[in-house]
Amino acid sequence: MQQVLNLMNGVLIPAGCGETIDNISPATGQKIATIPRSNDSDVAVAVKVAKIAQPAWATLSIDERAEWLDKIADALESKIDEIAAAESEDTGKPISLARDVDAARSVSNFRFFANLLREKPKEIYEMKDATNIVVDKPIGIVGLITPWNLPLYLLSWKIAPAIAMGNCVIAKPSELTPMTAFLLSQILLEVGLPVGVVNILHGFGPEVGQAILEHPEIGAISFTGGTATGRHVAATSAPMFKKLSLEMGGKNSTIILADADVEKAVAGSVRAAFLNQGQVCLCGSRILIADEIYDEFANKFVAKVESFKIGDPMDEDTSFGSLISNAHRQKVEAYIDLAIKEGGTILTGGTRPNLQPPFDQGAFLGPTVISDLSPHSRCSTEEIFGPVVVLHRFTSEEEAIAIANNTEYGLAGSVWTEDIDNGIKVAEAIDSGMIWINTWLHRDLRVPFGGVKNSGVGREGGYRSFSFYSEAMNINYPK
Ligand code: NAP
């Protein structure tokens, strides 16, 4: 049984109160670790430690800090299989996905921000009679709060730019998925990152997470998680004028226009719907299909969904793992029951698969496709965050755009068409932070990432991350 520990002051330690929380593998229901149940006292100590470390860290040169990020990337890369195995066991996601997406991206997050820091242009604006120099000063101590669906991927996406800009961090991973944050803690000790620069505290959101939000010396909060929690994060932090970045939920549309290449659109939209068992904020969980090709698309879509191999996440051939927990599966099942009550037709899935022990105790649920619902129904407009998609027919592009915009969310989506110019026109009409055309989840780390409406506030990615994790100051002097 592994004992996950906090990283604080350059050592791995339990919570000050000594209490722990059980960590359960969702694919088997078995306990795999205990984690510290940290609280406000641990946050208070971490802030003291970070305050001591921050001035020296901030005075390192850009090249020195970039070198630290590269060292972390190299160390993560040398443990890619270990990271993938830990992520798969902790989340229930297929090992191939954990290796190719989660582990690989954690490495590239550190490497990308190291290179971007080296390339960061100096901002100098000359006037006739004066010069302006823009200096990006670190905020000081920043709080990072992350969810369970892409644990190390999202944690590293925040830690790398935050420390690159000279901040020290206090991070709280989801208590459901602590394992790779603990691996990262061990790696940071191995590479010898200066004490106190990164502090990782485990525990419950309303306890240790809340203490991070409330601590007056934490100057910025970068939060990724659900919209309801994000609202609470904003309500708590905004009166203290903390800088806030909120990456929240989504209900993203995949729009299949009449001229789409159906084979490509089916392959792309199945991946967009069900990657990580539909537990990606960017997943296309409502599919809007032009009337002319609806039947052909729906038949091929269902056939492809039925070809998933469901089961042991550690098996290289598995393409569909378990949900994050039994509680989450029950929430998703409640939406399926609701869909049936609202007149929906289950085209495939909707039930728990029959699996051998120990996976019969896991939180598995078959990929589910539902048709015949109103686009205004709750299943079509609320975030389910699981393996459930709804199919809708449209008769004009205007109707497709209206359906796509008919949710409280505005995170992402995709448009499938053979006419790129028209695809761009449709994309621009959607209230969303990101739209892909004929692809999905193709990411250049320099581009803005984030949502509109109830999906987010602010953008991360590339220089926008650097802007968030710093305060721009202008210095003007006469010539
Ligand atoms: P969540 O319940 O909102 O939790 C997110 C994080 O907030 C967790 O670490 C959680 O800790 C913590 N938290 C909870 N209450 C808190 C409080 N009072 N103060 C401070 N922190 C608190 O979200 P989730 O269920 O883990 O993740 C799923 C959601 O994340 C979905 O809505 C998904 O769309 C969204 N998401 C968005 C993006 C994006 O980039 N837009 C990316 C990934 C996921 P506990 O785990 O202990 O509750």
Image: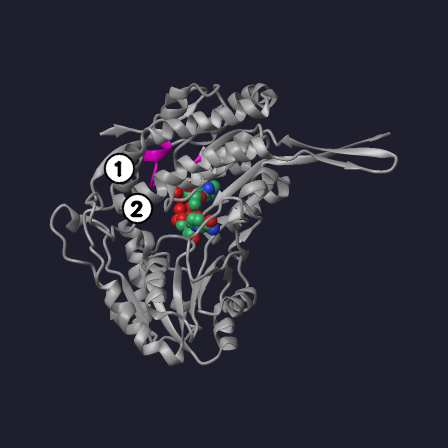
User: Residue 339 versus residue 257: which sits nearer the camera?
Assistant: 257
Taking 58 as reference, is 275 left or right?
Answer: left
Residue at the spot x=77%, y=37% of the render?
A: 125
Residue at the spot x=28%, y=55% of the render?
A: 329
Write down the residue under mark 2.
97
Q: Is mark 2 within 8 Å of ligand 1?
A: no
Secondary element type, mark 1: helix
Q: Is residue 476 above or below residue 421?
A: above
Query: Which quadrant would the N terminus be assigned to in this image?
Result: top left
Q: What label does residue 77 carry, if any?
A: none
| Residue 261 screen position, x and y as percent | 37, 69
Residue 345 showing in the rendered view: no
Taking 93 as reference, is 208 left or right?
Answer: right
Amino acid type at circle 2 is Leu
Residue 359 showing in the rendered view: yes
CA gap between label 2 and label 1 equals 10 Å
Write down the residue under mark 1.
85
Q: Please say whether residue 417 is one of the residues in the magenta stretch.
A: no
Question: Which span is picked out in magenta?
Answer: 172-182
Secondary element type, mark 2: helix
Q: Is residue 221 above or below residue 43?
A: below
